[in-house]
Image (cartoon, helix red, strand yellow):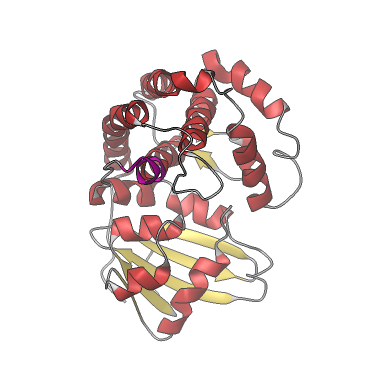
Amino acid sequence: MGTVTTFDPVTEHERARAALAAAIPRLVGLLRAVPDPDAGSGVPVWSVGDVGTHLAAVYLAYTALVSPETATEWKDVLASAEGALTGGTFVERITAMNARSVTLFGREERAGTADFVAERGETFLRVTEGLAPDTPVSAPWYGDVPFTLATVTGLMLSETLVHGLDIARGARLPWPIGRDEARLVLGQSMPTMMAAALDPVKARGVRIAFDLAIEGGPRLAVVVEDGTATVTRDAPPRAYDCRIVADPVTFLLVSFRRTPVWKAVASGRMRAGGRRPWLAARLGRLVAGP
């Protein structure tokens, strides 16, 4: 069953904040270094410039959740995103918000994306300094999902790292993702987002318990029971159907569909074991993505 690990949520959140603070200037530098904003990116339907605009929208959105000074601006964006807040599945809502995000800035305004990200990133870190990681945060476009400040911080870090990679791939620029950075994303935001993104149709009638062990931490118990999922950090010992051991960066990129599962398995960076190891492939199909 493995060893039960423990973590200090306050210390981990401070580490996530420090990682975000270090990643923001890297992202700003990358945005300024892009030679051709019309080049294709790591997101097939978006150009490099589209990804930059999406990131600006992400920084505006998450900063608005914690900062009254930007909340009104974001409400105006939400009001124009038809269907993003009500009705539809989790994937449909996020897809609608993503489509709206790339129209946030016009072509000429995109030149200021780097400065916008720098300013909003600084605001987010400033207004959340000293707040507890379990501070409730409402993100209505995600639906009825219990967000905390730790979740939002982890999401900002994940968007920065993954979309930074999308830009770098299109611009042919370096963009390393550190294992510690990936671990912090997986620990801070993955428990909430995996449960929220479960496909209830595909999960209907399914009962599987996964032991997801990220090398160096975190360790997550992912339990799917007839259309719902619970994801628990450092769960007490129990019987699992399948154990997945993964390199943190690899699992991050597989989770966001930036690396195919077969490549992760072939390289030895993801391994399945337990009583029913063949169920590992089901996890990626049960958890949806836009």
Of 21 and 276, which appears nearest the observer? 21
Question: What main secondary structure does the magenta stretch of the protein show?
Answer: helix
Q: Quadrant of residue 145?
A: top right
Residue in the picture at 28% in, 55% down: 6
Q: Position of residue 39 (x, y in %)?
A: 45, 40
Location of residue 193 with respect to 224 vertically, above or below: above
Of 194 and 219, which appears nearest the observer? 194
> In the current view of this chain or complex, which residue is farthest to the bottom?
275
Of 118 and 212, which appears nearest the observer? 118
Q: Position of residue 37 (x, y in %)?
A: 45, 32
Residue in the picture at 60% in, 40% down: 98
Q: Which range of residues does the magenta coloring cover?
A: 166-172
> In the current view of this chain or complex, which residue is farthest to the top?
69
| Residue 226 sits inside the magenta stretch | no
Q: Position of residue 95 (x, y in %)?
A: 63, 46
Q: Quadrant of residue 275?
A: bottom left
Q: Relative to 176, is 223 on the left or the right?
A: right
- Does residue 164 appear in the picture of this structure? yes
Residue in the picture at 52% in, 35% down: 50
Location of residue 20 with respect to 239 vertically, above or below: above
Q: Relative to 49, is 114 on the left or the right?
A: left
Q: Relative to 182, is 134 on the left or the right?
A: right
Q: Position of residue 150 (x, y in %)?
A: 41, 39
Q: Quadrant of residue 1?
A: bottom left
